[in-house]
Image (cartoon, rainbow, N blue to C red):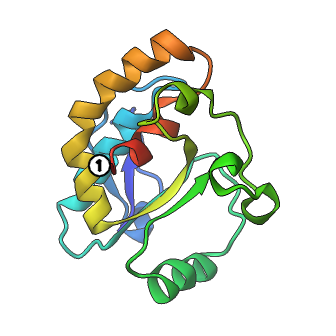
Amino acid sequence: SIYIELKNQAATLPMQSLGALAAEPVETDYCALFGGMAALMHAAYADADNAHFLFASSDSIPLKSFAQVYQRVVQESPGSSQFCMNDAFHGDFARNGCGFNDEMHEHVPLFRKAHQWSVLTREHASMVLTNAHKIYPQFCDAKAQYSASDGCSDEFMVLSTLR
């Protein structure tokens, strides 16, 4: 299933011909997109047939075909969630190609930065939805105290709720 958070409810839903469904819109802003991600996840989680939850930006250029993504996610690793982590976490930038600044983790180990693009299993989606209300206030406090410019909610919250 495809779920889209559409701010302008009067607009035509993109990809409707492919069966896209609208998620309840929530207030989001630059660097504060986790609420939108949670709304999409909540809408998708309501359908018990949804086993994976894949997030990608609307303005992303697809780097892999749908067939490649489907093979990797559904056929090769159906029980795994996947994240593009900071190179320091993996220790090998060349292998994962996901280098970026993760200063907040040095101060608050709970928070681990990952790119917004991610794939979650149903079990992990449930954990994100369950834990978000507890972790988000901690994220806001840590961001204000340690790293106002390092990281957005969509980069930290998904991975940090899985602990």
Q: Is residue 32 above or below residue 141?
A: below
Left or right for 81, reference 30: left
**Residue 10 visible in the current orientation:** no
Which quadrant holds residue 36?
A: top left
Q: Is residue 141 above or below residue 78?
A: above
Identify residue for label 1.
128
Q: Position of residue 74 (x, y in %)?
A: 45, 82
Left or right for 38, reference 113: left
Q: Position of residue 99 (x, y in %)?
A: 74, 46
Residue at 28% x, 67% y is 122
The extreme bottom residue here reads 75
Residue at 37% x, 61% y is 20
Residue 70 vs residue 9, the one in the foreground: 70
Residue 13 vs residue 90, the one in the foreground: 90
Q: Position of residue 141 (x, y in %)?
A: 38, 15
Q: Is residue 143 above or below residue 124?
A: above
Residue kind at label 1, given as amino acid type: Val
Residue at 19% x, 67% y is 47
The quadrant of the picture occupied by the N terminus is bottom left
Residue 17 vs residue 77, the one in the foreground: 77
Q: Position of residue 51 (x, y in %)?
A: 31, 73
The secondary element bearing badge 1 is classed as helix
Q: Is residue 147 above or below residue 61?
A: above
- Which class describes the residues within 10 Å of circle 1: few (<14), some (14-19), or many (20+)? many
